[in-house]
Image (tube, rainbow, N blue to C red):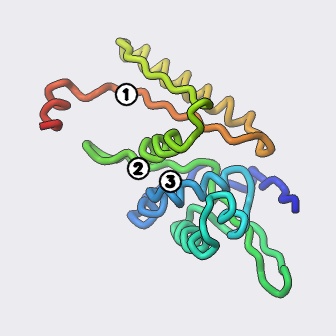
Amino acid sequence: MTITRMPADDLPETFHVTTDDQLRAVSNLTRHRIMAVLRFEPATITQIAEQVGLAKGSSSYHVRLLERAGLVKVVRTRKVRGVTERYYAMAARAIALPDPGEGGPDVLMRHAVADLEASPVDDRHVRMAHLRLTEEQFAQLAARLQALADEYRELSDPSLPDASLVFALFHPAPREQAEGGAK
């Protein structure tokens, strides 16, 4: 069966997570993986279950929570042997998470690390660089990284294998603050 590509014109650019229910829904690693399946094209509960490696009942439960939170929506239905089959898709092209606040867990980075750890070792490109930059250089680098990510997101083709790009540009906590938290 072929599923046609979801019309991107119909999607809002960004869904802003603002409520505790939405944050709980998006914070779960299983639901994160379900949203990854729905990133480029709609899928049924059965298709989601197969791709994520879950039982249909578990898949249905997690999709319902995402739907209640407004993160995914039904974009198409069809009758199959008297049963209505629903195709789910992301509610927006991107999800904006709230700032975790000082000392709070960063949901996005936790999911990125979990995805990285689950990826094949021979197909990873991970680097860390410690830089000393002026505030202007820092801002320029942030803008260049965002532009690069946006450029390649526009080139994304759902028929190609999935790839994830994660970057974090930040000023580390001052040493005394970092050491004080480690005691």
Q: Secondary structure at mark 3?
A: strand
Question: Residue 62's spot in the image, x, y percent?
Answer: 54, 68
Point out residue 122 in the picture as x, y percentages from the top left corner: 60, 30
Residue occupying image coordinates x 45% and y 45% = 108
Say above or below: 131 vs 83.
above
**Label 1: which residue?**
170
Spatial separation of the CA atoms under disc 1 and disc 2:
16 Å
Picture quadrant where residue 99 is located = top left
Q: Label 2 near label 1: C-beta < 8 Å?
A: no
Return the residue found at the far bottom.
Answer: 82
User: Type of residue at label 2?
Assistant: Pro
Residue position for label 3: 16
Q: Which residue is mark 2?
A: 98
* First in sequence: mark 1 vs mark 3: 3
Mark 1 residue type: Phe
- Residue lying at 85% horizontally and 56% vertically, measured from the top left: 4
Q: Residue at x 53, y 60 (%)?
A: 31
Task: Write down the quadrant of residue 146 in the picture.
Answer: top right
Rendering coords of residue 170 (x, y %): 37, 28
Is the residue 74 above or below the residue 129 in the image?
below
